[in-house]
Image (cartoon, coloured by chain):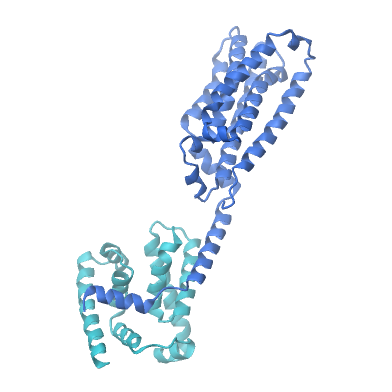
Chain colours: A blue, B cyan
Amino acid sequence: MKDKDIKNVLSEYAGSPDYLKKDAFIRKMQKESRNADVSVFRMIAVQAGHIRAYIWFVFAFVLIRPIFSSASALPTTLEVFTLIMPFFSSIGIFEAMRSRMHNMSELEMTTLLSKQGTFFARMIIIGSVQFAVIAVLSVVFSMGIGIDAISVGTGLLLPFTLTNILCFMIARTQFGRENVWFCIPVSGLVIAIREAVVNSSFAERIDCRVWPLLALALIVLQISEFYKTVKTERFSWN
Amino acid sequence: MDIEVYYDKIYRYIFFIVNNKALAEDLTQETFLKFLKAECEEPERFLYTIARNLCIDEYRRIKPLSTDDEEVLTQTYEFEEETVERTTIRDALSQLDDDDREMVILRFVNEEPIGEIAKMFNISRFAVNRKLSKAKSKLKELLERGSDER
């Protein structure tokens, strides 16, 4: 009797577990562990760790730069900041859709965290930080220049939210799914729109109270677009 | 951890201890339930430890019923009809020491590496090889004798 024969004899003697019982048990275990482990908080905490360092660096730079500007340079800094707001916005979309850029979507679909959950968590983290940065900037510029914080905030929010909305809309299309780089031309387009509006007589004729209301409406629309985009990331097996 | 990979291994390991398919399946599932409640760095070794402890608990649970283990097993569990060959294998395995039997199962049935078995039993790789070689020769002899008698 050879070693191989011993192995065969013993394996045949043990047989295999009941396939149906085994399958039902494994499915139940996987379902339970998934439900138990992946809370929204955990999902956000895990994804926060995956956001690349340069994103945090950009956020920190945008936040800190005005503090070190002299009072005379602040109006120019504010002008530059309203121009970079579309890029500040699209960088978040870019980071949240990183898996698409590297063709890693299929891999993400098979992990414990769903692709929808991953996208949701990343956008929540990045979006919250971005809004916090805009709020701080509004106060800093307001104190430095002497304009009210709502006007400064509106000036920063309008290009920011408009870029976000357009990016979300395009991200849901087939073109957007295949080309994450679309965020860059969208940012350029928003800058062009802003410049056109600011330099036209049309802007002067509008009541200044309309702009904060428009910013508020855009925020509501942005939330709605975010919800629609998150929904498209849902897969039946997740 | 991929349950599917370890499920069959743990089932076979338990089956050779309890000698009963239904009980082995129940204890296998219980092993995984216990395992998932705890966190550990070396899942395979931990699974075998849980499985072994559950078998010991099961043995203690049924032991007070009778002093004769064979009788207890026959009374407690509905054994599937065993062929003569199965009886020969079971008899041959029962004549090995508990540790030797466990090593044979881990090495020849579950194909665990010698290093892993050495860690489980807290002995050297050399000792595992020596014990396995001895147990294998004994098992071979018992199985061949059993088939000759048939």
Drawn side of residue A209 relative to residue A48, left or right: right
Drawn side of residue B52 relative to residue B29, left or right: left
Vertical side of B100 occupied by B114: above or below: above
**Image quarter of residue A87:** top right
The answer to whether residue B109 is seen in the rendering is: yes
Nearer-the-camera pick, B47 or A166? A166
Residue located farthest toward the front when viewing the structure as drawn: A174
x and y, in percent, of residue A138 in the image: 66, 20
Vertical side of A75 occupied by B34: above or below: below
x and y, in percent, of residue A5 in the image: 25, 76
**Image quarter of residue B133:** bottom left
x and y, in percent, of residue A82 in the image: 62, 17
Vertical side of B69 occupied by A204: above or below: above
**Image quarter of residue A216:** top right
x and y, in percent, of residue B112 in the image: 31, 65
Nearer-the-camera pick, A165 or B119? A165
